Amino acid sequence: MKEVDFLKAAFREYYFKMSDRVEVPEHIEEREFGYQNFEGVMIRHLSFRDGGDLRAFLLREVPAGVYCSPARYTDPTLPMEEKGWKEADLIFDIDADELECKCWNEYRYWICESCSAIHKGAKLDECPTCGSGRLRPVNFVCDECIKKGLGEVSKLLEILKEDFGVKEGDVKVYFSGNVGFHIHVKDERFKGLGPAERAEICDYLMGRGLMPEVLGFGRGMPLASRWRDRVLDSSSLAELKRMYRKMGYEGFRSWLERVALEAGARIDPSVTIDVHRIFRLPGTLHRKSGMAKVGVRGLEFDPFRDAMPFGSEPVRLFVERSPRLDFRGEAFGPFEREEVELPKGLAVYLVAKGVARPL
Ligand SMILES: [Zn+2]
Ligand SMILES: [Zn+2]
């Protein structure tokens, strides 16, 4: 398992030299930690006394993934029912990989776990080479995917600010380390909320259940909602009235649904609702990319520049298949079954993606 050794050595180097990049959460002793090792085993219900304790653990264990609870507990090491849940930050997950992108044909691969063949493009049920059903997806992201993800982030931030009055200083946006973004909201008003209330917030942010009544149409009570202005941003009230007369109540309602899908934030509600979930700890590395979960400032982000901690010393690799990738201003690839010398950052990335092996 040369690939695993190579990745583990890189992760060890990172935690040895750059452990100051790991974010130590406030009230660390009340957080539940978990980690995944390079054999794929997940271990949960851990806790650390302080940052030094956490860093010593990272160096000793060299985990493939490190997770921490946005929740605070009386005793985070006990079984879930006995931990004594106190509160949890509100967290949103936006998966850039879910937003349809023109790169899907170029940047999506399926690796056959039986014969190692790599197939490009749309999802397959079985391997065209050997017929096996064990196909593992490999997801690269392109600039466009990142841009789309950040577009969803900015919609979310806008609704949180305008409709919920969340202050900018209470929100932190992170690149998840692979293909998505995590938005951490530290606003005190949300901390004590349970799953049902968090589900309602998600519905609102996504514009779910937006009814014609919001514009004063139909028979129900018009709900006071900033969504009215959001719909009116797209068309005038007179125009909407004409549409309503033409489409009827149901037709107009489905039209509103599509508006909401566009104007709302495409978050994954199941992530926000689960108040016991653990999330990748900022500053730690992602097993499937070799990149770190890092803060995003503004809406300009280049994963290889901003999240890949490894540099440009040359590494020799055999690449099974890779699309063209831009690494810090230089283009590499596409490669297909060839030996190449690549900057370490890109080498770690391709090995983590499972499409290359070090020589
Ligand atoms: Zn196969
Ligand atoms: Zn893309």
Image (tube, rainbow, N blue to C red):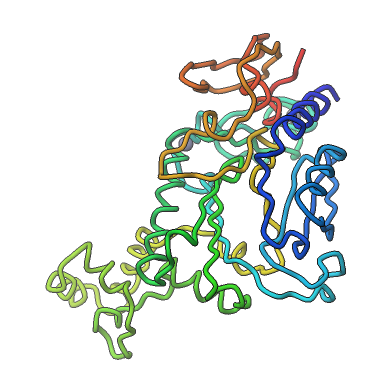
Q: Say which of 148 and 90 sits in front.
A: 90
Q: Say which of 117 and 271 sits in front.
A: 271
Q: Residue at point 75% right, 35% down?
A: 15
Q: Position of residue 290 (x, y in %)?
A: 67, 33
Q: Residue at point 50% right, 32% down?
A: 105
Q: Position of residue 253 (x, y in %)?
A: 33, 74
Q: Position of residue 257 (x, y in %)?
A: 37, 68
Q: Say which of 149 and 130 sits in front.
A: 149
Is 204 displayed left or right of 43 in the figure? left
Q: How many marks?
A: 0
Q: Is residue 144 above or below residue 310?
A: below
Q: Is residue 37 above or below residue 191?
A: above
Is 25 displayed left or right of 39 in the figure? left
Q: Position of residue 309 (x, y in %)?
A: 63, 29
Q: Quadrant of residue 297?
A: top left
Q: Is residue 260 above or below residue 286?
A: below
Is 325 displayed left or right of 318 in the figure? left
Q: Residue at point 74% right, 40% down?
A: 133
Is 183 displayed left or right of 79 in the figure? left
Q: Is residue 79 above or below residue 330?
A: below
